[in-house]
Image: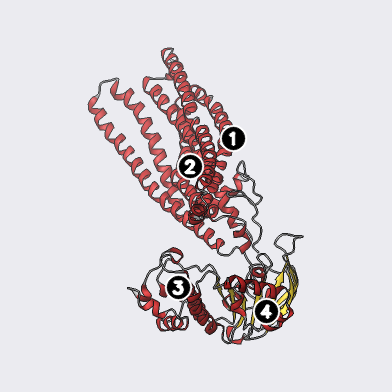
Amino acid sequence: MPPPIMGNRGGNHHGMPVSKARNVSGTLRRIWSYVAKSPRLLTLICLLVVVSTYTTVLGTSLIGQAIDKYIITFDFAGLAQFSVWVIAIFAVSAAATWLQMRLVVSVAQNTIRDIRQDLFYKLHTLPIVYFDRHTHGELMSRLANDVDNVGQTLNQSLIQFVSSILTVLMTVTAMLLISPVLTIIALLILPASIFVTKSIAQFSRRYFSLQQRGLGDLNGLIEETISGQRVVKVFGRERIVIDEFVKKNNALKDAGFKAQFFSGIIYPLMNSLNNLGFALIAVTGGWLAVTGYAGLTIGKISNMLIFSRQLSQPIVEISNLYGTLQSAIAGAERVFEVIDEPAELSDGKLVDKSTLRGNVEFQNVTFAYKKGENVLENVSISAKQGSTVALVGPTGAGKTTIVNLLTRFYDVDEGAITLDGEDIRTLDRRTLRQNLGMVLQDTYLFSASIRENIRYGRLNATDEEVEQAAMLANVHRFISHLPNGYDTVLADGGEGISQGQRQLIAIARVMLADPSVLILDEATSSIDTRTEKHIQQALLTLMNGRTSFVIAHRLSTIRDADEILVINHGRIIERGNHDTLYAQKGFYYNLYTSQFKRVAG
């Protein structure tokens, strides 16, 4: 039986949405650790930011000089010459800005590439239990939406944030050189601006986090219902699915509205404060100029007015960035949550296929997916090299759990499982699994050619070896009649060919892998009788000389098994071959005769 689902779509590990970013500074440091991988580019970007900011402030200062020296005196010839210098300075600023943006995009894309690679790598090192507790849609949301959100923020905000700080520092310095009094008036607006930004950001951060989690929740539902579309239609559940989607979509809309509203309201409030500061400087500066205070001129007052705009503009930009930054932090936290998950350890003893005999033993194994609710209790199995052990019993009895433990998707709670006398917990997981071949009821084929799907069993196999495996699996003839033969590209999941054909291709893939131990999990349960004969022939070829564990609902397919284990409620209640168990007229007898009666009927 599968493990219980823990948590909800889009939630954290405990199934509850997180209302806000829990560790802003820590998350920013994590992002910076990726950004800092390009130190030379960052140094050049910083130099370009300094150049562009300084030339912008310098160009503004020259405008005031032009007013006092040339415009008021009507010296248009001097103004024309002076304008050339001003234009040249602004041209340098524009060029520096253009180049820094190109470099920023490069750094941002490198950063996102590295984060995405680390996340994808971690997904392939996580234990199966993690995927049992998180929907595919939620994980896709983290890999796509959350990572892209971080990337867009880096593209738009990284340099803008640094440039805004430098602009404030340089502008304040230039203003102090002109008029300390007017500078103080301009700076009086800053505390109010910071207070407004901080107050509103508390709300926007919470709702941006909820928006990201709501998006993951919705993606989980979409992915689930699209994958299960046939089931939805067969049971007529379209209305229920649509209602659930509407509910989650509305929740996402509400969170998105509040997030965008609180982040968007910052700009008009900051703009109003900016206009207030502009008016105060204009009135005060005009009065001081009339009274002759500190040699204030029209040009200097003009500079102060322009500088007041330049001073408030970075604050407004930083305020606008705050909402975007909070959204990115919320997304980054979700990404780092996955990256920080404990990986499935694979540091045991390597398994040499050439030395394996395939003797498998379960020694008093007890296991529970959830503590206190044992799925297997004191199970002992001995499978000798080349033997076939069949596992039968009602749904939920624990048959698939035995397979999950053998493949080390989970580890036993008590007892041990050995392969040729070695406890499999001491073996390297990856090489252990490479020596186990699995043919499942639900065969998965990749969106690739048939040749590549078979070669997935052994990537260095030649075309001749691939075709030989297909012949042994009784699927070569079918493939040869396709228009493109082995180069026929399959749709995702193998759509376009029958279940039986998919199963035969999967058998060919396992044959090519040449494992020592086979696991056949209800491999023919959804196949028609005629196709089943072809598959059974292929399976007999595959099982020849290999230790095989067979889970089968059709008991007629396991009559020749060396040992049949009857499992119920996590315990082995009967064991023996078909004739022995049938003669006992116990649980197996009842299962077998009930199936025979249904077929006969």
Q: Nearer the viewer, mark 2 or mark 3?
A: 3
Q: Nearer the viewer, residue 600 or 371?
A: 600
User: In this picture, is 94 found above or below 105?
Assistant: above
User: In this picture, is 517 found above or below 234?
Assistant: below
Name the residue tied to disc 3: 501
In the rendered structure, which disc, 1 or 4, sits on the residue that comes first in sequence? 1
Residue flagged by tag 1: what amino acid is it? Answer: Gln
User: In this picture, is 365 found above or below 561?
Assistant: above
Q: Label for residue 202? A: 1
**Element type where label 2 sits in the image:** helix
Where is residue 357 shown, x and y percent of the image?
63, 86
Quick one: label 4, few (<14), some, or many (20+) residues within 10 Å? many
Looking at this view, name the residue that lies furthest to the left.
Answer: 77
**Element type where label 1 sits in the image:** helix
Tell me how far mark 1 sits from mark 4, CA to CA: 63 Å
Q: Label for residue 162? A: 2
Name the residue tied to disc 4: 564
Residue flagged by tag 2: what amino acid is it? Answer: Val
